[in-house]
Image (cartoon, rainbow, N blue to C red):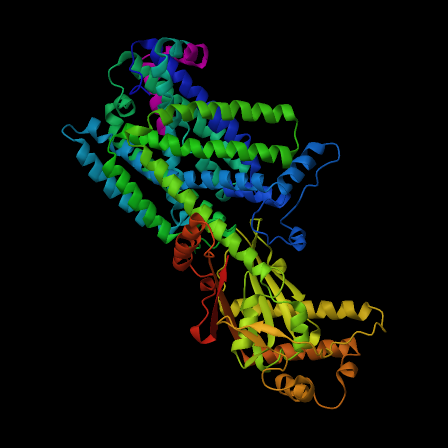
Amino acid sequence: MFSKAPVNGNEDVLGALSLVLYTLILIPLVKYVFIVLWANDDGEGGTFALYSLLCRHAKVNLLPNQLPSDARISGFRLKVPSPELERSLKLKERLEASLTLKKLLLMLVLAGTAMVIADGVVTPAMSVMSAVGGLRVGVSGINQDQVVMISVAFLVILFSVQKYGTSKVGLFVGPALFIWFCSLGGIGIYNLIKYDSRVWKAFNPVHIYYYFKRNSTKAWYSLGGCLLCATGSEAMFADLCYFSVRSVQLTFAFLVLPCLLLGYLGQAAYLMENHADTTQAFFSSVPSGAFWPVFLIANVAALIASRAMTTATFSCIKQSTALGCFPRLKIIHTSRKFMGQIYIPVMNWFLLALSLVMVCSISNIYEIGNAYGIAELGVMMMTTILVTIVMLLIWQINIIIVLSFVVIFLGLELVFFSSVLWSVGDGSWIILVFAVVLFFIMYIWNYGSKLKYETEVKQKMSMDLLRELGPNLGTIRAPGIGLLYNELAKGIPAIFGHFLTTLPAVHSMIIFVCIKYVPVPSVPQNERFLFRRVCPRSYHIFRCIARYGYKDVRKENHQAFEQLLIESLEKFIRRDAQERSLESDGNGESDSEVEHTFSRVLVAPNGSVYSLGVPLLADFKDTGKAVMEESTSEELKPGPSSESLLSDAEQSFDKELSFLRKAKESGVVYLLGHGNIRAKKSSWFIKKLFINYFYAFLRKNCRREIASLSVPHTHLMQVGMTYMV
């Protein structure tokens, strides 16, 4: 603070202290601990957790893959808006009807997430540099270049041990932080007794008024430094998955906040008698006998704080990936007990590289502090806006309380933000550029994914065409199960038509598998798979939607996944047979399809039109029975007609279950359809740039969806398809 507004008397110290005290009370305590922490998504915090919460209560997600069945997942726990509060219903309708509001909401979330990741770069640089800077007090002759080199070594060590997870170092972190906070409180009490206890007067907010009256513009500049006392508040919310809300509230209110207040009061007491020593007030105020222990624990605390922010960054990236707003990356879960403890290798080394660049290029601690303030305030403002929408849409509380929250906190944060932006030209602009680049990466990925999904929906295969082909689909049904992966939650993907026109045979059982992330933290195992029949039973074609929450761990290999899928399919067939047995007889339905005489057409992979007026190998009318006997082996024997075989629901269930088990024994093959998109020649230049280059580059270099299942190459079959959008 005093780098912008030098101390001219004790009143300046009291005014600056009063600003710090009330910033600590208002932002971390009142806003985050008592209000924002309650806006968690089933224990998950952060900007994307808030967005997920909103997506669950209103259809604001731009990716049009929502299904009515998603609301029946137990984790949704929707609170139906009460008739008394029509405001909530009107806001919900307005959000769902306006594409502009949906895009604006998404852009706010993406901007907040970009700032969180930027925070993950600045926090290690700032924390380590400020802690190591204490050497200049304890050791004479240490210059700034040596401080930078030691900080670089500390940062390399910090990011190298990140992969070991929080739970493995938790036994060390807890006691270390407890000692650190107690040290802050103890040093503060020592300084209050030794120097000047009149600093207690700073709790009177009138000193803030006097501070601005005396220093005017300089006092406004110093707000960027004042904000640094509240940094870490957003990490406390983003890292919420490790602790309960009540434990964070109790720990902050009865340990962290009192020790911080005592620490700042003690520093102010020291400065009341040492106006010139403002650059290293903390280390200078430490008793000489306790300097080295305090220096050691300060550096340990800096590393822990940096680690916490990095972990919060990983959590936000995983949430944004699950909701289709960040390219897929390799995610390693570091704890079997806590699902939220993750490690992302690519981002870890990326954050390390940027932190090193920042430390080496901006060695001035004040410039790094300003960059820190920009990143932190960007997240804080987005959180304030999102929590305001949560208050209106979900909490349904009094409008006066909502307006008070947004006016007080957003107004306060805008004042702070105006202060740090004024100094953006001193080197902290780097963090803004980094955040903008991240924002565009996330926005382009979301835009491309949305465009690709919408195109696949428009070009999906006609159900009538599939029925016309008959149970053999115009080709031979070879024994086995084919899992055709696609992103469609409804309809038959166009890529399946390419399989039919390319291959002489398809598997006797086809399951369209859609891996879908729903806006909940986790989906129970018994609610994971959602099955539907795509055609009549004789086709043996099913749709399976594998639903995951953004917090779920996908550690199962392909064998475990297959086992879970087959078990769920058996349950579905059993339930379907029970429902059919309850239906009234005599409805005249039959699973055998009647052949139609009009033409059937598919588009081949090379773009040519392929006529299926006659099946690929033989006319289904003449050889259909023989083919069925071959594909189903023992299940369908010549003799009785299909209608007689399907007349008894129980017998039909046994045969279908036996058919499934035989197909499973024959093997499971993963049919992967890689759908790519390219902009049409008539498209705008910006669209061509985004789709043909930026999105194509991200898609080419991101992690494949199937990679987490560890499927052997011998079980894979891939077909590519390009859509012009």
- The answer to whether residue 683 is seen in the rendering is yes
The image quadrant that residue 176 belongs to is top left
Q: Residue at x 13, y 29 (%)?
A: 141
Q: Residue at x 57, y 49 (%)?
A: 519
Residue 135 position (above or below residue 524) = above
Total number of numbered labels? 0
- The answer to whether residue 330 is seen in the rendering is no
Screen quadrant of the N terminus: top left
The image quadrant that residue 583 belongs to is bottom right
**Which residues fall within the magenta stretch?**
183-209
User: Residue 520 appears at what percent x and percent y?
Assistant: 58, 49
Residue at the front extreme of this rendering: 682
Q: Nearer the viewer, residue 615 or 308?
A: 615
Q: Residue at x 51, y 31 (%)?
A: 32
Q: Nearer the viewer, residue 141 or 459?
A: 459
User: Residue 626 appears at what percent x and percent y?
Assistant: 66, 89
Residue at the bottom extreme of this rendering: 639
> Is 383 one of the magenta-colored residues?
no
